[in-house]
Amino acid sequence: MTQTIKEQILEIRGTGLTNMFDVNMVQRLAYEHDFYELVTWLEEHRKEYVRFILTGEE
């Protein structure tokens, strides 16, 4: 996970607009915020994403 991806995840979380386990909505919000790297990354790294959400570990 790059620093950019981490920052984008935290920014989406900060909006409070979705449950962070709703990956499809996280992707939609990422797209709306022009976080295209995150949209693509989530497609390929869902397990890593869930681990980050649960534990804060990368």
Image: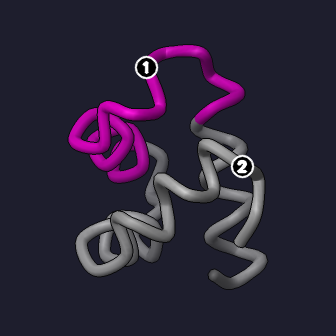
Specify the label residue 18 is tagged with.
1
Q: Is residue 20 part of the magenta span, yes or no?
A: yes
Q: Give the x, y percent position of residue 14.
A: 71, 27
Q: Quadrant of residue 16?
A: top right
Residue depicted at x 48% and y 46%:
33
Mark 1 nearby-residue class (10 Å; few <14, some 14–19, many ≥20) = some
Quadrant location of the N terminus in the rendered image: bottom right
Bounds of the magenta span? Answer: 13-32
Badge 2 marks a residue whose secondary structure is helix
Q: Main secondary structure of the magenta part?
A: helix
Specify the label residue 55 is tagged with.
2
Quadrant location of the C terminus in the rendered image: bottom right
Q: Quadrant of residue 22?
A: top left
Q: Quadrant of residue 28?
A: top left
Q: Give the x, y percent position of residue 52.
A: 63, 57
Residue depicted at x 69% and y 84%:
2
